[in-house]
Amino acid sequence: MTTPAGVAERLTSLVGALRAHGVRIGTGETVDAARAAEVLGLADRELLREGLAATLLHGAGQRPVFDPVFDLYFPRGVGGPERKAAGRDDLRDRLAAALAADDQAMMGLLAAEAVDGFGGYGSSPESDGWSSYQTLERLRPQTLLARVRDDVRGRGGSEGFTDRLLEDEIRRRIETFRRLVATEARRRVAERRGRDEIARRAVTPTADRVDFLYAGKAQLAELRRAVHPLARKLATRLAARRRRAARGTIDLRRTLRGSLSTGGVPMKPVLRRRRPVRPELVLLCDVSGSVSGFSDFTMLLVQALHDQFSKVRVFAFVNRVDEVTGLLRRGTADPEGFSSRIDAEARLTGYHGSSDYGMALGEFAERYGDAVGPRTTVFVLGDARTNMSDPNLPAVRQIAGQARRVYWLNPEPRSSWGTGDSAAPDYAELIEMHECRTARQLSALVARLLPV
Amino acid sequence: MFTSVDDVSARLAETGYLASPAVATTVFLADRLGKPLLVEGPAGVGKTELAKAVAQVAEARLVRLQCYEGVDESRALYEWNHAKQLLRISAGRDETWDETRTDIFSEEFLLTRPLLTAIRGDDPKVLLIDETDKADVEVEGLLLEVLSDFQVTVPELGTITATRRPFVVLTSNASRELSEALRRRCLFLHIGFPDEELERRIVRLKVPGLDETLAHSVVRVVGALRAMDLRKVPSVAETIDWARTLLALGADTLDATVVQATLGVLLKHQDDVLKAGAKLDLDAL
């Protein structure tokens, strides 16, 4: 291999950082990546980026992790920009021009200048690091919208029908600029604090590994978009499990009975037929603010799986319980509509607005007890934080006694179960409780726990 | 096959396939490293077209294996021609058993299917395994031997190894997660929607009669639709269809009525049409 030593070292640490983010890369791929770097050369950074992505990644979902990590290990340059920003107004003027012209290269340069000029913080300027937040706060690129719009219109760049698209387009360009600033700030920080550490800490993980409870708005939206493909994958996995389950064990009685016609020699073994069961699912979801991201994602997922389960009933609670099955429209995952319909139409709170597991579970056992039968699998979704009220274990015992299986999916890390007002250990004694913090964990659990 | 990444772009462009830098780089690497290329992406972005374009550039024969649920060894790899074997047996009545046996399992009675066709012979070939995700998991196992060593084992004939490696393209719509083992053997390429400038060039190339400014507007509207949260966002194929429709209708600028009337070309669900209509301020019908 003729790859220069420095490149090989850098490549392996890039691979190390990607592995730390859960991207599975074998040695074979690393060697391929080195060969790709050799073939493509190091002159063109974007070619190298695509080449490494092609050899190292295995799915489109890994790309959002790869790009920032690549930017850290193969940075655009070293140190600050050659041209120092003349001042805030000057920079804003030039940024407005670049936004109006949709000039990506210029925006990249301006991002570097902006971070250099306004992003440094610490006791003496730039001593502690660089902040994209501070840069954007001082520069406020979003306030350029009207100016850029009038500029484009003034030059006749947008007229007729497409004029109505202009504002959204400019917003998207500003968003691009913000991302450029974030990348640039990360690069500068990495120069100071060491690449490996920043690559592990400052790069957001792939959507399926984001903690439900801490997911931002954009990440939740991305998760919701992932519901459909995920449901389809789970459906094929369940179908495969079902096919395998159909090949049952030998039915001895019927095999012997059949062997009578061949003089007692069992020529044809008769297999025991599994009776097709119609599993019923009941979902009991805490939809209070603290866990809402988790529960509505899970509900959507199960709803998207409805082809597999003809009988799904969904109940939501905060401190009172109400059935929301009718509010989910079959066949479509429509998250925003669903949450707002729950808010508008279901009665989930009485007296106060915080969640009360004891009261809700008690009410469920009392009012909807007949929804749970010997063929029912019940999933309880929630963090088991009872706000110091009675956990109402008898109600849980009653539900568990009636149902075929009961599982509790808890979006909190196992280590914090039982801390503060969490009644998780009490419930976990009666019900099998699983930690379910990310979409990845959820899909693994759903595939394992759902009845065939 | 190619000398540089720019060479790839230029020669693909000659066949009418405009490649983004990512596509050109990956095709170049697949050729240089001799690895199969796994292409994923939404429907209608030109995954299959890429294989066809590469075949045309390389002046190679395109061998296509269309995957579907239930595709098996005899459809993908090879099959013995039983009818012909029977005829041969009944024609040679006076022969000894040994003669017949060695004869009926010879190449003459072998029906080659795409995978075997692709690795036999000396002429250049491009093997397109289309919609790999539709095939069952067992077929993936079959592909592993073919794709890593470019060889096929026929028990009666022995192992057939490719004398000239075909350029392999696998496409997938990600309706099923392909196995890690298969992915590991391939270069991965995700073809997304092209950026505005590239899409404009594609539209101009595919619909030559379209006015420059109209092409510009078309691409901008499609871009806006893609930013919306729709069930099925329009793909490049739909952009081209729309441009053709506008050309056929003789529209020379876009206005609300024209867009309203032709939105069905771009969007395939009624919900989406309504949602887009509201967002674009089209007058309700």
Image (spheres, coloured by chain):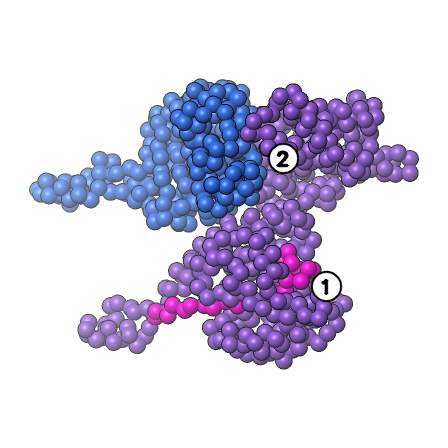
Chain colours: A purple, B blue
Asked if residue A293 lies in the magenta stretch, the reply is: yes
Crowding around mark 2 (Cα neighbors within 10 Å: few <14, some 14 to 19, many 20+) is: few
- Earlier sequence position, callout 1 versus callout 2: 2
Check disc 2 and give the amino acid type. Asp
Check disc 1 and give the amino acid type. Ser
Q: Position of residue A207 (x, y in %)?
A: 62, 48
Residue A448 numbered tag: none
Q: Quadrant of the N terminus of chain A?
A: top right
- Alpha carbon distance from label 1 to label 2: 43 Å
Provide the residue designation for mark 2: A168
Q: Position of residue A90 (x, y in %)?
A: 80, 24
Q: Position of residue B45 (x, y in %)?
A: 47, 34
Task: Tell me if residue B190 comes above or below residue B7 in the rendering.
Answer: below
Q: Residue at x 47, y 25 (%)?
A: B203
SS label for mark 1: helix
Using residue A195 as the reference point, say whether residue B100 is left or right of it.
Answer: left
Asked if residue A44 lies in the magenta stretch, the reply is: no
Using residue B99 as the reference point, say whether residue B199 is left or right of it.
Answer: right
Quadrant of res B80:
top left
Q: Quadrant of the C terminus of chain A?
A: bottom left
Task: Tell me if residue A371 comes above or below residue B131 in the rendering.
Answer: below
Provide the residue designation for mark 1: A416
As drawn, the residue found furthest toward the right would be A124
Of residue A240 and residue A158, the one placed in the foreground of this image is A158
